[in-house]
Every structure is written in C-alpha cells, then in structure tokens.
Amino acid sequence: MAIIPHEKTSCGGLTLHRIQTDKYKTTTVVMQFKAKLTKDTVTERALLPYVLQSGTAQYGSSKAVRTELEKLYGATLGVDLAKKGDFHIMTFRMDFANEKFLSEDDPLFKKALTLLADVVMNPKTGYAGFDPSIVEKEKRTMKQRIESIYDDKMRYSNMRLTQEMFPDEPFGLHVFGESEQVDKVTSQSLYDYYKKICSEDEIDLYFVGNLEGIEVESIVKELFPFEERSSRESETTVKASLEVEEKEVQETQEIKQGKLHMGFRSGVGYADDEYYALQVFNGMFGGFSHSKLFRNVREKESLAYYAASRYESHKGLIIVMSGIEAKNYSKTVEIIKEQLTAMRNGDFNEEEMKQTKTMIRNQLLETVDDAKGMVELLYHGVVSRKLRSIEEWLDGVEAVTTEDILAVADKVKLDTVYFLKGEEA
C-alpha cells in the first residue's frame, strides 16, 4: 500500500497540497481555515462560511452561485465546520469534472477555481461590511441549526457532556456557536472578523485528482493572493488533563429513551507514540460490533439499544454513548465501568486483538480510497503537527502488543457520567 502521493508547498499565505491520482474522474478541492477555538469568535466563525457561500461580488445570491456551478458541468460547492482539538476549522469543498474527460477543450480547472476564489476572496458587501440581507438570513438559519441540536438527543447529550467536562475551556464550546450570541453579530463586525481570518488564519488548500499538465501553483497564487503570515508550528492542542474527579450529571426532558454518555480522559493524543495502542484499545472497548460494550452492555445484558465508544484523538478523549431505559441507569454505568476494568486486567485474547486490527486496517484503507477521506487524514497531520504515512499507520497498528494495550488502558480515567432521562423516570 503506497503512501498518499502528497506534494506540499508554501504558496504565499497558504500551504498548497497536491495529491496526484488518476483514480477519479473528478477533481476535489478542499480549503481549510484553522484558528484557535475561542468564546469571543466561535459564533461569528460558525456563521462566516455560510455567509460567504450565499453571494459574491459577481454572483449576488446563492441562486446565482448555483447557476454558475451548473454551467461548470454540475460542479458542487459546500461549506462545513469542525472542531479538532483546540481548533475551530472552516472548510470549503468543491468537486468538478476533470477536464481531461470532457469532449471540449475547456480549461475547467481554472474556471472552477475562479468561482471558489470568488466565494472566498470577493464576498458580496453592502454599505457597512457584508450584505445585511444575506447576514440576517444566515443568522436565522444558524439559530435553527443550533436549535436542531436540541431535537437530536444524541447530539445534545454529546454537547452537554463536553460542556460539563470542559466548563472553563474552549473545548467545551460547540462548533455551531452560541445561540445567545447570534443577534450580536452585525454585517460590519462579521466583515471585520473575515478580514482578520484572511490575514491571520492558517490556510491549507488541497487538490485531489489528475493534475498533470495543470499549472496549479501559478493559478493558486493568482486567485488566492493571501498575504504571508507568521508560522504557527508551535500551536497545538493541549491534551485533556488527567487531574479530574469523577462527576455525575443528570437532566430531565420529555424523551422516551434515556441517553447515557460517559466521558473518559486518556492522556494519549494523535501525535503520541501510544496513539496506535489507544486505537486498538478503543476498538476492543467499544469501537466495533465485537467490542466489550456492544457484547456485554447491549447483547448479553440487553441493557442498551446501542452502546459504543469513540476516540477524540486530538484532545485524548474516549466518549461512550448508549441509549437505555432510565431504570437500567445504575446497572449500565456499573457494567460500562466493569468493561474498562476488564481491559485493564487483560481480559481479552489474541483473536479479539487480531479482529480489531483488521477492522482498523479496513477502515483506514476505505478512508484513503475516497478523495475527501484522504484529505481528512492528511489534515489530521496539520492539526497535530505529526504527519503519518499510510504505512506508518498500518505498521503501527499491527505492532501493538497486549502490553501496549494494558499500558494505555491503565491511563484511561472516567471524568463525567451524563444522563438525559425522561420526565416519568
């Protein structure tokens, strides 16, 4: 399995990443803006990409932008937000046909990139900052987006667990911002913030596709003339401290199925040597359908509708999620804790380890088979300042021993038990 064919160059105020492959008939472009997550900026930052995609100086509405995308053989453009460790990431993604597969001799690459540059670099403005009608419309949509979290009880419970685990830290903030801050955002304040991110954010621009014969660098320099910025090499996520006392939080709402979410700290992050062992540990603990949580909490004891764990590698967290009847709360918490004790005691065999490693391997190979997955994997390297090749990943996971798993299992510490239950419980 070859390493992702990845060429990286500094290009003015951004870092350009080229992934040359003839596997796809499309070209995928992903532009990432990265800055520290802060209470002061989280809401404006969550609003900004949606305002930018809703109209440019040349194409004054989202409808006009969509019409232009259609002209580009049905190209797609979307925005996204993510929280990776202590960072708040804004993403712009574009997919368009590779011109080599079109019958006419049309320089589609530059045309498509010109539209993306228009969205990012030339927004529609009004007398004071952004166009006020676009900003007000997107503020209304943003409030709905935040409210939708409350309707999705799994997402809501995840949000509440994170808030309880990190009450005074930026990591406790939600990626969509804070509802009570939305009305305070004005066209001018958002535009001022936009200018700040253009001059200060760490920007990475990825291209995945058959790029042979295309002057990618010169086109990028022409269309994205960001000013040079100081290096951010020293900026990394602070792993969650292990100095915590276990706490319990219960809330009541009108729901049928209770949501039990438990937050553990591991002290092991993406850039650490023990990262692979923690991946295998999590796979055996609750990451897959053969894991301890799935088998013992869901199948054997029939206590949960679902039971799984995920690893937030940049902050070093393991989050357990389960849907249960309120009457089973105490017993479920006890059995989940027992599964951690079992992992610490080495209550697993070679076959389970082998199966877990195979699942992680398959997951990884599936991820790099997809253009966006490839970018996501490479971008973890930017956020953590530790770029891992596919070989390193596969070899690292394969090399994990029982002793390695016992060592990381011993570090894992329960921080918060959060339970959202129905009113009649």
Image (spheres, rainbow, N blue to C red):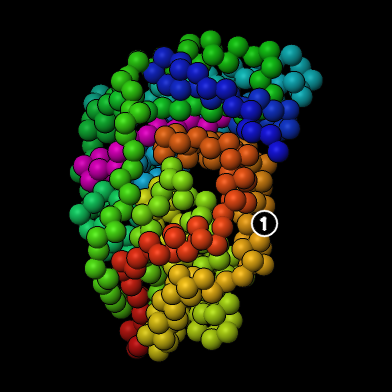
Residue ID at (40%, 65%) = 410
Q: Residues within 10 Å of mark 1 (few under 14, many from 20)?
A: some
The residue labelled by disc 1 is 358
User: Taking 372 as reference, is 118 above or below it?
Assistant: above
Q: In the rendered image, is residue 368 in sight?
A: yes
Q: Position of residue 259 (x, y in %)?
A: 41, 74
For the C terminus, which image quadrant? bottom left
Which residue is at 34% across, 38% downward? 236
Q: Which residues are magenta?
A: 29-43
Viewer-nearest residue: 118 or 293: 293
Q: Is residue 41 magenta?
A: yes
From this viewpoint, which residue is outermost toward the right? 103
Residue at (35, 65) in percent of width and height: 413
Q: x, y percentage for residue 57?
A: 41, 21
Q: Position of residue 417 (x, y in %)?
A: 33, 72
Q: Amino acid at mark 1?
A: Thr
**Secondary-structure class at tag 1:** helix
Classify the position of the N terminus by image quarter. top right
